[in-house]
Image: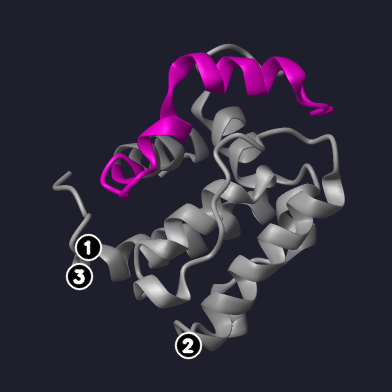
Amino acid sequence: MSLQASCLNLMDRLAGVPDFEHFLNPTLLLQLQANSNAIWETTPNDPVSQLWILFRLGTPLACILNSVRPPNQQLNVDNDDLSFANINTCKERVFHFIVACLHDLHFTHENVFTISELYHDNPQGFLKVLNTVGKVLDRMEANPGPGAKAV
């Protein structure tokens, strides 16, 4: 499957994540693309660029992770803090996602991306990000929580 097809498939699956619809808002996605400092040229409605930029924020990853965690173990999701103004805060959120995948979901290191793979402009690294997120969604779909939506 091509990178673009993988991203389109993942975007469809993300529609089933509780409280994720905010991140899939077309206006928000275009705004994030316009304000990103991506070194590659982004085109409007390009699902690869949109997901890459979205996941780099970290907050959407926390929302995805919360779909498979009990309410008392939820990560903080601030829908109003969606900028790259403090890149270290974004990376910290990504780090918490990675640690939770390893420790709470018991994913192997081979099945979890690194911060570098997300923030470097390398399609191979981004494929690993997509695979990790896909595995979290597999877990959510296998054990839907009370807020899960059918996709």
Does 65 sit above or below residue 16?
below
Q: Amino acid at mark 3?
A: Ala
142 and 127: which one is in front?
Answer: 142
For the residues labelled 3 and 2, the Cα–Cα distance comes to 16 Å
Instruction: Give the SS element for disc 2.
Output: loop
Q: Give whichever of discs 3 and 2 has the lower sequence position.
A: 2
For the residues labelled 1 and 2, the Cα–Cα distance comes to 17 Å
On the image, numbered disc 3 is attached to which residue?
Answer: 142
Give the percent coordinates (x, y) of residue 109: 62, 82
**Looking at the image, which residue is at 35% across and 69% down?**
68
**Looking at the image, which residue is at 47% across and 68% down?**
74
For the residues labelled 1 and 3, the Cα–Cα distance comes to 4 Å
Does 34 sit above or below residue 81?
above
Q: Is residue 80 left or right of residue 117?
A: left
Give the percent coordinates (x, y) of residue 3: 51, 40
Q: Quadrant of residue 42?
A: top right
Q: Which mark is residue 9?
A: none
Q: Which mark is residue 141?
A: 1
> Which part of the image, by quadrant, shows the C terminus?
top left
Give the percent coordinates (x, y) of residue 53: 65, 35
What span is in magenta? 13-41
74 and 144: which one is in front?
Answer: 74
> Which part of the image, by quadrant, shows the N terminus?
top left
Give the percent coordinates (x, y) of residue 67: 35, 62
Q: Amino acid at mark 1?
A: Glu
Does 45 sit above or below residue 138?
above
**Looking at the image, which residue is at 63% across and 78% down?**
99
The residue positioned farthest toward the left in the image shown: 150
Q: Is 148 colored magenta in this rendering?
A: no
On the image, numbered disc 2 is attached to which residue?
Answer: 106
